[in-house]
Amino acid sequence: MRGRPALDLTGQQFGQLTAQHIFGRTSGRKVIWECVCSCGSTARVSTSDLRSGHTTSCGCTKAARISAARTSHGDSRSSKPRAVEYVVWCQIKGRCTNSKLPGYKHYGARGITLCARWMQYENFLADMGRRPSPKHTVERKNGKLGYSPDNCVWATRDVQNNNTSRNHRLTYAGETLTLAQWAKRRGLKASTLRMRISSYGWDLKKALTTPA
């Protein structure tokens, strides 16, 4: 007896996973999807696990919660939880170089690149060092430029927003306010408004008037 037609999940995103195509079926007739993770890795996940939220990444999310205190040689070993810095590097590299990832259109497709030196994880780690805390992320000082030692720092979201609030004043409809003030007035998160302008390249009117 033939199984039920498989639900078409092609292109749908489940957490950090984006379904690409059906890989096959298990002996129990479960449909298995080949998925690409936002970190650039692939994973094979059943329809039920995707739709229920049971599986939302290739495993890198769990690894990111584990503070790594090992050398860079052991950071990428699949037999052990991968170091958080390695996961961050994979995510950056993926969004800049992998056109199959949903975030590529906002980064690689717009000319946001990963410098040649940082194509090697060991160089990225040597330049950036270990992540100071779970609240820190890699920030590009100039959102129009790519990822490189001169343009990137570890920063908390609060610091990023504060830096933007102090240095980025925006004039719209004859009124000048800080980015944070505009975000509050428009009912947006400051980080959302900042991403729209610096990373997505939206003009100011679109960034301020598009609902969250």
Image (spheres, grey):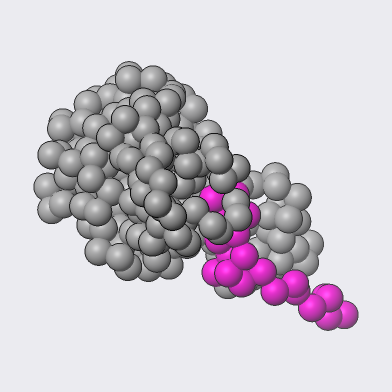
Residue 210 shown left or right of residue 202 in the figure:
right
Q: Main secondary structure of the magenta part?
A: loop
Q: Residue 15, how many percent across, how many down? A: 60, 49
Q: Is residue 78 visible?
A: no
Q: Residue furthest right?
A: 1
Residue 80 vertical position relative to residue 19 in the rendered view, above or below: above
Residue 59 shown left or right of residue 138 in the figure:
right
Front residue (pair 186, 33):
186
Q: Is residue 207 visible?
A: yes
Residue 160 vertical position relative to residue 13 in the rendered view, above or below: above
Q: Residue furthest front?
A: 174
Q: Which residues are magenta?
A: 1-20
Q: Quadrant of residue 101?
A: bottom left
**Quadrant location of the N terminus in the rendered image:** bottom right
Residue 190 vertical position relative to residue 202 in the rendered view, above or below: above
Residue 196 shown left or right of residue 141 in the figure:
right
Q: Residue 74, how many percent across, how many down? A: 29, 31
Q: Which residue lies at the image location 45% right of the left edge and 60% below the top edge?
A: 205
Is 14 magenta? The answer is yes
Q: Which residue lies at the image location 60% right of the left edge and 59% below the top edge?
A: 13
Q: Residue 55, how many percent across, how many down? A: 64, 47
Q: Quadrant of residue 94?
A: bottom left
How many marks the image carries: the answer is 0
Front residue (pair 150, 141):
141
Is 76 magenta? The answer is no
Front residue (pair 73, 113):
113
Q: Residue 63, how many percent across, how many down? A: 47, 33
Q: Which residue lies at the image location 32% right of the left edge and 68% below the top edge?
A: 109
Q: Which residue lies at the image location 13% right of the left edge and 53% below the top edge?
A: 116
